[in-house]
Image (cartoon, helix red, strand yellow):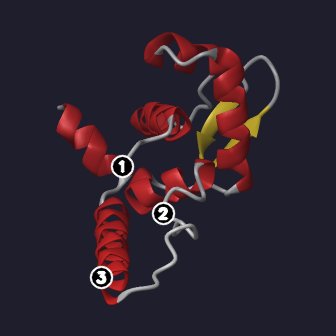
């Protein structure tokens, strides 16, 4: 499975927001860029997608920035990935099964995709932060 850069950067940004969530203050865009080395234009697009998915919110002004819409323990990795890469687990319609063998292989890919989704669904942002230490 090839992970899109958008999903990778979205998880880094969300982990940064999760680490700072307890402080109750919005995190400035520049802080996320500096701490996670995410290109600014790319981060702006990603945060807009995360906002559309109701995972983050923002506030304006000199003390403004971004913050999680709900506690990090309630946001799964799958929530984040699907917000920025909605077709990552979509079936490849070019794999039309026309033989019993092809049907078996397509079922295998479907099972793999389902297991990947389950793994990401069972991991929260807190789980990832705990892995960092």
**Which residue carries the number 2 mark?**
89
Total marks drawn?
Answer: 3
Residue 101, quarter of the rendered image? bottom left
Q: Residues within 10 Å of mark 1 (few under 14, many from 20)?
A: few
Residue mark closest to the camera, 3 vs 1: 3
Q: Is residue 9 visible?
A: yes
- Pointer 2 or 3: first along the chain: 2
Left or right, 53 with reference to 20: right
Circle on res. 132: none
Is residue 108 or residue 18 the one in the foreground? 108
Q: Secondary structure at mark 1?
A: loop
Identify the residue under disc 1: 1
Q: Nearer the viewer, residue 52 or 39?
A: 39
Question: In the image, which disc is placed on residue 101?
Answer: 3
Give me the residue at 48% from left, 14% from top: 37
Measured as percent of width and height from the top left, residue 40 is found at 66, 16
Residue 76 visible within the image: no
User: Residue 46, percent across and down?
Assistant: 65, 36
Work out which residue is located at the far front of the displayed protein and give it: 99
Position above or below: 78 against 32: below
Q: Is residue 105 above or below residue 37?
A: below
State the residue at coordinates (37%, 84%): 103
Going 28% across and 44% down the picture, which residue do you hit?
128
Q: Residue furthest top?
A: 34
Tell me the CA gap for discs 1 and 2.
Answer: 9 Å
Asked where in the image residue 67 lies, by quadrant, the reply is: top right
């Amino acid at each position: 499975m090839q992970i899109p850069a958008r999903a990778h950067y979205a998880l880094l940004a969300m982990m940064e927001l999760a680490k700072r969530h307890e402080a109750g203050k919005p995190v400035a865009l520049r802080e996320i860029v500096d701490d996670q080395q995410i290109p600014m234009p790319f981060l702006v697009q990603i945060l807009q997608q995360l906002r559309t998915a109701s995972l983050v919110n923002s506030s304006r002004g000199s003390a403004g920035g971004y913050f999680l819409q709900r506690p990090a323990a309630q946001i799964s990795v799958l929530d984040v990935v699907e917000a920025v890469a909605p077709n990552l687990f979509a079936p490849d319609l070019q794999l039309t099964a026309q033989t019993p063998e092809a049907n078996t292989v397509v079922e295998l890919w479907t099972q793999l995709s389902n297991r990947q989704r389950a793994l990401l669904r069972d991991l929260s942002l807190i789980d990832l932060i705990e892995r960092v230490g």
